Image (cartoon, grey):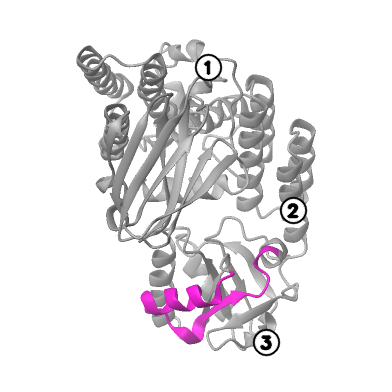
Amino acid sequence: MNALNHIFALFVATIVLVSCQSDTTTADGSAYFGGEVVNPKSKFVILSKGETILDTLTLDENNRFLYKIDRVERGLYTFRLWASEGLEYQMVLLEPQDSLLFRLNTLEFDESLVYTGRGAKKNNYLINLFLDGEKEDKTILGYSQLPPKEFERRLDSIRDYKLNQLKAFNDKNPSTATFLNLVKGNINYDYYLSKEVYPFVNYSKSERANFESLPPDFYNYRKDINYNYCELMDYFPYYSFLKHHFENIALLEHFKKSDDTVFNIKSLNYNLIKLNLIDSLVVSDSLKNSLLAQTAIEFISHSKNINEYDQILNSYTAKTNNKKNTRYVTNMVNALKNLKPGSPLPAISIIDYNNNELALNNVINKPTVIYFWSSVYRSHNDSHRKAQELKIKYPEINFIAINASSKDYANWKQLISQYSYAKNDEFIFKNPELAKQKLAISPINKVMIVDKNGKIVNAHTNMFSILFEEELLGLLNQ
C-alpha cells in the first residue's frame, strides 16, 4: 500500500472497524483459501471478514497453509501477516466454490502477490487494479494542478479506460455480479475521490477560491453516492472516498458561516459540521461509527486548544453507539488534559535494552524529544532517520525512542539489532496499553518535547513538521 495510506489505515483499523450486514450476502457453499509465504517473518496468517477474525492460520514446514471456510459469504476478506516493513495486509474476494491460493514474498509484499486456482483471475485483476492505482496517484496529483475542466477531461479518460478494460475482461472471463459491482465501485469511487480532493491539492489558489472556480456540474455524481455500499464497505478506497467527501462538503458549509478562505483541520466549527453531516447521511452504524471516531480523533490529535475538546467529545458521543470507541476517545481527551505544558510526565515504567526497569522521568536529564514507534507501521525507519539528523544538529537535546506496542522483549531487541538503532536510546513500555492511554499516543508517530526537568513543553507534535525545529530552538532558549 501507499506508505501514508498504509500508516493511516492501520492506525484507524486499530480502533474503528467497519462491517457490513446485508441480506444480499450468501452462504451457499464452502471455499478454500491458502497460500505460500516466501521469507516469512512469522509462522502465522490472520484471516478476517469485517470485524470478525475467522482464524489464525499456522504455516507448515514449507511455509504453506490451506483453510476451508464453511458456508462462505460472498465478499471481501482480509489477510494479514508480518513482512519486512511490519504488519501488512491485503484484501481478497472469496465466493462459494472458490479454491484460491496465493504466493507472496514478504520482501515485496504487494508487488509479489499472485493468485492461482479457482477464483484467481478475479483476484489477480483486483491486485493489478490496486497496484496500477498506486502508480496513478502521482499522475493524478500532477493533473490536479491543471484548471478544473482540463483536470476533469484527463480524469474522465482514466475512468473510461478502466471501464473498457473491465468490459474486455468480462467478455473473455464472464464474472459474477459480486466481482463486477466491486470493480465498478472501485473505479467510480476512485474517480469520485480524485474530484473530492481536487480543491485541497490544487495549489494555485486558496480552497475557497478553488471551490468558487469549479464548473457547476463538477460534483454532479454526488446524486449517485451510495452511503451504504455494502460490497465496498470493507474496501479502503471506498472508505477513503467517504472521508474526503465529508471533509469537502463540511468545508463548504463552514465557508458559508465564516470568513475563512483556507482549510483548517483545527477549526472547531468545521469539525462539528462534519460530525453532523456524517450522522445525517451515513446509513450503516458500523461505517458511521468509524467515520465519527476518525473525525473526533483527528481533531483532538491536531488541536492544541484543550478547551474545545469537550465540545467535540459531546457531539461525538451523542452520535455514536460504539462503546469501545467512545471509551477510547474519552480516555484520549482526559489524558491530553493532563498533558498540558508545564505539567510533569505521568508515572510510566519503561524497560531499557539491558532489561532494566526505569521510570520514564528518571531518564530525562536534559531537554528531550520522545518519539514513539511500532514495527507494525512502516514509518519507524523514517522516524529514526529524522531523529538521527536532528540529534547531530542539536547535540544539546536528547532523543529517545519508545516502541509503543511491543510486549515481546526478545523480539524488540531483535528489531533494534536488525535496524542498527542506538541501544542506549531505545526503550519499551512495561505496560504498553496503560502507557499509550496515559500519554495519549495517537497517532503512533506523535512526538513529545520535555524540558530538562521532565516538564512537558509540547505533548503532541511532529518531527516532520516544518515548524518542529523552531520548537527545538525555543526549547534551547528557555
Residue type highlighted by circle 1: Asn
Residue type highlighted by circle 2: Val
Q: Which mark is residue 362?
A: 3
Secondary-structure class at tag 3? helix
Q: Which mark is residue 330?
A: none
- Closer to the camera in the image, 274 or 208: 274
Give the image location of residue 450, x and y in percent.
Answer: 63, 76
- Closer to the camera in the image, 416 or 205: 416
Q: Which residues are magenta?
A: 407-433
**Discs 2/1, front:** 1
Q: Name the residue tied to disc 2.
A: 333
Residue 134 to residue 441: above or below = above
Give the image location of residue 82, x and y in percent.
Answer: 42, 57
Image-quadrant location for residue 342: bottom right
Q: Name the residue tied to disc 1.
A: 226
The crowding category of the residue bearing disc 3, from other C-alpha atoms within 10 Å (few below 14, some 14 to 19, many at least 20), is few
The earlier-in-sequence mark between 1 and 3 is: 1
Rendered-image quadrant of the N terminus: top left
- Left or right: 67 as drawn, with respect to 144: right
Image-quadrant location for residue 316: top right
